Image (cartoon, rainbow, N blue to C red):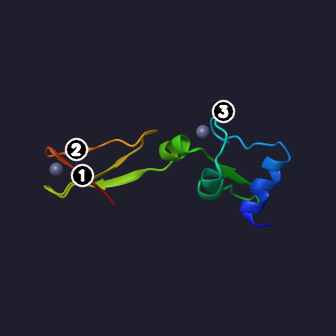
Amino acid sequence: METITEYYNGINAGDYYLCDKCNVSKLSLNEYVTNIRDIENSIEKMRYCNECRNYLILKKWKCNVCKSTGNTRNERELTIKHCDKVVSII
Ligand SMILES: [Zn+2]
Ligand SMILES: [Zn+2]
């Protein structure tokens, strides 16, 4: 079944979808469609709210000044600075 149809079928039936990590946030359609992860050896999928997704996915950044790179993991969008400049997310 198409994901969007599936989402609205549930919502129309009075259902809601909770984030598989925090089990607190109700997923918006956008989160439901976008923040999906496959589970190994399963046809089931994990779905996350944006905050948990941000936390789970490592972001790589690169300093535009000294060219060094790094990873960050945070629940919120952070501004990362290196060499006093905001880095690029790559
Ligand atoms: Zn969550
Ligand atoms: Zn730097």
Give the left or right position of residue 19, taking residue 83 as reference: right
Give the left or right position of residue 81, taking residue 5 as reference: left
CB at disc 1 and ligand 2 closer than 8 Å: yes
Name the quadrant containing residue 9: bottom right
Please tell me how crowded label 3 is: few (under 14), some (14-19), or many (20+) other residues with Cα within 10 Å: few
Q: Which residue is mark 2?
A: 81
CB at disc 3 and ligand 1 closer than 8 Å: yes
Q: Which mark is residue 75?
A: none
Mark 1: which secondary structure?
A: loop
Out of 34 and 11, give the one closest to the viewer.
11
Q: Are marks 2 and 1 in contact (CB under 8 Å)?
A: yes
Q: CA distance from mark 2 to mark 1?
A: 6 Å
Q: Which residue is mark 3?
A: 24
Outermost residue, bottom side: 2
Give the residue displayed 35% in from the left and 54% down from the top: 60
Percent x, y for residue 15?
81, 43
Name the quadrant containing residue 18: top right
CB at disc 2 and ligand 2 closer than 8 Å: no
Mark 2: which secondary structure?
A: strand
Give the residue displayed 14% in from the left and 43% down from the top: 84
Type of residue at label 1? Val
Percent x, y for residue 75?
46, 39
Type of residue at label 2? Lys
Out of 75 and 16, give the one closest to the viewer.
16
Q: Which residue is mark 1?
A: 87
